[in-house]
Amino acid sequence: MTVGGWRPASVVEAIAATATARILRLRVPEWPGNLAGQHVDVRLTAEDGYQAVRSYSLGSYGSGEIVELAVDEVPDGEVSPYLVRDVLPGDELEVKGPLGGYFVWRPGGEAPVQLIAGGSGIVPLMAMVRAATDAGAAASVRLLYSVRTADDAIYRDELDAVGSDGGVGVTWRYTRSAPAGWTGPVGRLDEESLREAAWDPAREPTVYVCGPTGFVEHVADLLVALGHPPARIRTERFGGA
Ligand SMILES: Cc1cc2nc3c(=O)[nH]c(=O)nc-3n(C[C@H](O)[C@H](O)[C@H](O)COP(=O)(O)OP(=O)(O)OC[C@H]3O[C@@H](n4cnc5c(N)ncnc54)[C@H](O)[C@@H]3O)c2cc1C
């Protein structure tokens, strides 16, 4: 039953994704399904009645009552450390959604598609990678994923798997340090690296950029400088600097 749009959600799995991030699978009875890229609001209620609400993207798409979130801990945050460290299978939360109708990808939709993620910004883009792979559209999708180090990459193994054999074209960007044997650049994304990794503006890609606010704004500026029309750049800002 939903009250004010809030649906009960029970945690069924909590899986360590990195040292600071967890994938949470929630059972949401009568979940109406969601498009790749949408998010939910999550509401926590303490024993004294205090409530906190934060938005989390869905890494899952489609129908079925199991939905997937992936949460990266923001140091000193109010909600994310609880979701990453404390929540256990069997715990009850509430979710409202699915929310958002703009930062979404539909099978049979625009092509080609350029996805650009920073940190936990991979979550809604992972739903798009999964949806495009399942729809047989992976060859028209490229993903550029910027992480501090290889160990900070959420969904690393799945991305390595989908990226092989003509699947989604995955390019990694390491901002702090790269794995042994890496010959590419290390550091903040720049125009040259973006030009090399992303679809050419002449191909008229739709570009989805997601991550911390500063990352999204930096990448959007680079894209415009490279000639991508702002109307074809879709952004989702997760907050922070
Ligand atoms: C549409 C949407 C989807 C989102 N999806 C995800 C997701 O899939 N996974 C995920 O981990 N997060 C996601 N977020 C971010 C999430 O909603 C919270 O902002 C984040 O978990 C921090 O909450 P908190 O209560 O721990 O921190 P707060 O107590 O709210 O904030 C503590 C401090 O951290 C800063 N801060 C807040 N958010 C961030 C951030 N994202 N990065 C860096 N600093 C921050 C604040 O300015 C403040 O100074 C999403 C945000 C939006 C708007």
Image: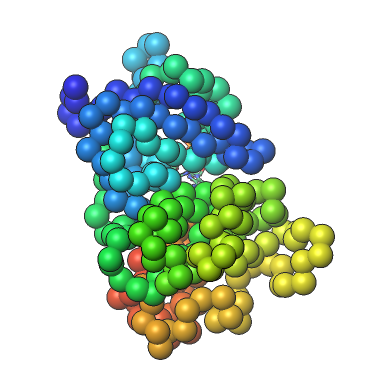
Instruction: Give me the residue at 51% from left, 20% from top.
Output: 88
Instruction: Give me the residue at 60% from left, 39% from top.
Output: 17
Query: Of all residues shown, which one is farthest toward the bottom?
Result: 202
Query: Of all residues shown, which one is farthest toward the top?
Result: 47
Looking at the picture, the colour scheme in use is rainbow
Instruction: Give me the residue at 45% from left, 24% from top.
Output: 12
Quarter of the rendering containing residue 139 = bottom left
Q: Is residue 152 visible?
A: yes
Quarter of the rendering containing residue 171 = bottom right
Viewport quadrant of the N terminus? top left
| Left or right of 204 on screen, residue 13 | right
Residue 195 on image: x %, y %? 55, 81
Instruction: Give me the residue at 42% from left, 72% from top.
Output: 140
- Image height of 87 relative to 229, above or below: above
Quarter of the rendering containing residue 54 = top left
Residue 129 on image: x %, y %? 44, 57
Residue 51 on image: x %, y %? 35, 23
Residue 209 on image: x %, y %? 44, 63
- Image height of 89 relative to 25, above or below: above
Nearer-the-camera pick, 79 or 17: 17
| Left or right of 11 on screen, residue 36 | left
- Image height of 73 relative to 38, above or below: above
| Left or right of 186 on screen, residue 201 | left
Nearer-the-camera pick, 90 or 64: 64
Q: Is residue 96 visible?
A: no
Q: How many numbered markers are drawn?
A: 0
Nearer-the-camera pick, 89 or 63: 63
